Image: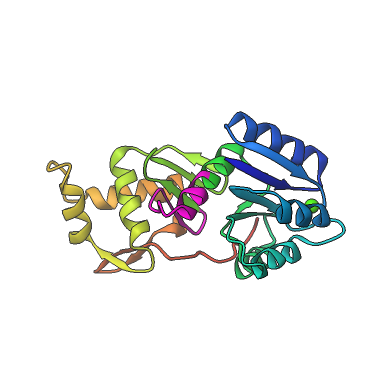
Amino acid sequence: MHVLVVEDDELLGDALQAGLRESGFAVDWVRDGIAADTALRTGEFSAVVLDLGLPRRGGLEVLRGLRSRGTHVPVLVLTARDAIEDRVAGLDSGADDYVIKPVAIAELAARLRALVRRAHGQGGGALCVGDVTLEVATRRVTFRDREVELNAREFDLLRELMLNSGRVLTREQILNRLYEWDRTLESNAIEVFVHHLRRKLAPEIIRTVRGVGYLMPRDDGPRRGG
Ligand code: CA
């Protein structure tokens, strides 16, 4: 897979190029918006890693130009942790995904692979809800740049909630699905797994709908206090 990295920060660009190469990607690196435009008009890329704050031409402008030319190459936007508006603007302008700086190469590589798979009509490889990414094939879960260790039951519960994000799942629905692979679950098992997921990820990722079940909100929105 051939990736174009657009990043003006020398240290970060260098790290991205080296890290992605180590992860098996072929990488071209350009350092400003004009060079990115030129590369995208002339080259063939599987995916683009795009910083937004760029000299000569901003990342959003590069992105809009790309989409206005009818090019569908997957674009992953790099964004600062607190720049929620950038993130929204990026997605509105045709970005396919985003990663928050500082970048974890493993997560970036995983997301790029998922984007490329999706672009090739092999969706279902990765689920993304809010800051949580779950790779079905490798059973890998990341939350805000860090990998999260889940046991099989926690993983399956999280996957169910992500597949149904924005909808309430009743305890019965969840139990039925988890029973498929384990008939020895205790009656309070769901509560226990939900507790584990909240502790390992963040309390707000799963909402309790009292008397009904659980809900994973589609997007947590901006976070306070860092
Ligand atoms: Ca920059």
What's drawn in magenta, residue-wise? 113-131
Above or below, 63 relative to 121:
below
Q: On the picture, is 154 further left or further right than 28? A: left
Q: Residue at x 81, y 47 (%)?
A: 31
Q: Residue at x 25, y 52 (%)?
A: 190
In the image, residue 25 lies in the stretch drawn in magenta: no
User: Which quadrant is the N terminus positioned in?
Assistant: top right
Q: On the picture, is 202 further left or further right than 157? A: right
Q: Nearer the viewer, residue 87 or 92?
A: 92
Image coords of residue 203 (percent x, y):
45, 55
Above or below, 211 relative to 96:
below
Q: On the picture, is 54 further left or further right than 153? A: right
Image coords of residue 166 (percent x, y):
38, 68
Q: Residue at x 39, y 48 (%)?
A: 197
In the image, residue 115 lies in the stretch drawn in magenta: yes
Q: Residue at x 25, y 68 (%)?
A: 212
Image coords of residue 69 (percent x, y):
67, 67
From this viewpoint, is residue 24 visible?
A: yes
Q: On the picture, is 10 further left or further right than 133? A: right
